[in-house]
């Protein structure tokens, strides 16, 4: 194969939208191989992960660059004539591609653990270092994060869910976490789940404290339309954010396979008797999220 000599013009603006991990920005370089003959191709990297950008006419393809693995199917495809095409690629990278690469790196790290350290200990230690990086970034945005074991909101949600036989009652964080208080008085938290490279983002506070974060957390509006279904509580949210869908009188959700998903719920069904407003207290959970996504969203979580 021959190395592409023409750079993809999308590469530099895409690299600029990805957060610098540990102060190391993404940079653009030549691709080590050509995926499509004569198509402008570039490789962007932060020194640990890399992505390949290919442009063919108005079609822009994004591939995860893995060692010893020639990419065949693009991880994301956009039309360059779309004004938000670069932002769409960045969102796909932050929501799915980079967490996948992190999970693969963590799995490899676990397999290399020595006799004095169990694989899960190595994984949790590494995920703890990711939380330290996030914590310093939150401090830069004016927050004061502190280590935490389990969110109170999640405990109330689990108790409520158990009363309803809800599968979310089984959710429990299994690793290190951080909590901090936002300007709205709400509590945000990030907790590790599983052996992969992802976390759960949780919220406990008034509805209005979510309004600035939901546009970042939710998928693009796309073909979503608001619905009259649900209760006064769910309609209060779905009217503002049509990406949300009611799943009960006290809960809305969004997302699906291969994307960030989440829910917003009243912590007690007794709250259904009150007329919802911006001060109504809610619990919310969003995940799985990688540390890159959290760093990119940090300014909206304080």
Image (spheres, helix red, strand yellow):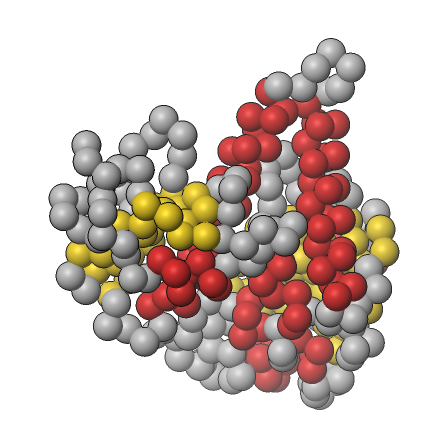
Q: Position of residue 236 (x, y in %)?
A: 59, 84
Considering depth in this image, is 252 or 297 the residue closer to the camera?
A: 297
Name the residue at 75% across, 19% down: 117
Residue extending farthest front: 5
Does residue 135 sit above or below 72 in this rendering?
Answer: below
Q: Position of residue 58 (x, y in %)?
A: 19, 64
Name the residue at 51% across, 33% down: 104
Name the residue at 48% across, 63% down: 17
**Quadrant location of residue 109?**
top right
Judge left or right: residue 59 versus residue 118: left
Q: Position of residue 31 (x, y in %)?
A: 31, 43
Does residue 40 sit above or below 88 in this rendering?
Answer: above
Judge left or right: residue 147 versus residue 38: right
Considering depth in this image, is 77 or 2 the residue closer to the camera?
A: 2
Does residue 142 sit above or below 158 in this rendering?
Answer: below
Considering depth in this image, is 182 or 207 the residue closer to the camera?
A: 182
Judge left or right: residue 129 versus residue 15: right
* Residue 21 seen in the current view: yes
Name the residue at 58% across, 51% down: 24
* Count of numbered labels shown in the rendering: 0
**Quadrant location of residue 178?**
bottom right
């Amino acid at each position: 194969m021959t190395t592409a000599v023409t750079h993809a013009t999308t590469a530099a603006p895409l690299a600029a939208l990805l957060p610098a991990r540990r102060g190391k920005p993404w940079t653009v370089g030549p691709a080590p191989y050509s995926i499509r003959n004569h198509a402008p191709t570039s490789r962007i990297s932060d020194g640990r992960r890399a992505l390949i950008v290919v442009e063919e006419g108005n079609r822009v393809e994004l591939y995860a660059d893995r060692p010893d693995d020639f990419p065949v199917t693009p991880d994301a495809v956009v039309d360059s004539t779309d004004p938000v095409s670069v932002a769409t690629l960045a969102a796909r990278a932050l929501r799915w591609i980079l967490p996948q690469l992190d999970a693969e790196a963590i799995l490899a790290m676990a397999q290399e653990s020595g006799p004095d350290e169990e694989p899960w200990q190595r994984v949790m230690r590494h995920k703890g270092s990711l939380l330290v990086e996030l914590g310093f970034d939150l401090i830069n945005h004016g927050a004061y994060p502190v280590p935490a074991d389990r969110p109170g909101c999640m405990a109330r949600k689990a108790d409520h869910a158990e009363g309803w036989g809800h599968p979310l009652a089984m959710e429990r964080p299994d690793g290190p976490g951080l909590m901090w208080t936002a300007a709205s008085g709400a509590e945000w938290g990030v907790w590790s789940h599983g052996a992969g490279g992802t976390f759960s983002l949780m919220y406990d506070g008034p509805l209005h404290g979510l309004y600035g974060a939901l546009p970042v957390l939710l998928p693009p509006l796309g073909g979503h339309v608001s619905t009259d279904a649900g209760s006064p509580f769910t309609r209060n949210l779905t009217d503002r954010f049509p990406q949300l869908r009611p799943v009960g009188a006290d809960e809305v959700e969004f997302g699906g396979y291969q994307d960030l998903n989440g829910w917003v719920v009243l912590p007690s069904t007794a709250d259904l008797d009150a007329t919802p407003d911006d001060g109504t207290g809610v619990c919310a959970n969003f995940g799985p999220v990688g540390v890159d996504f959290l760093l990119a969203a940090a300014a909206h979580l304080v």
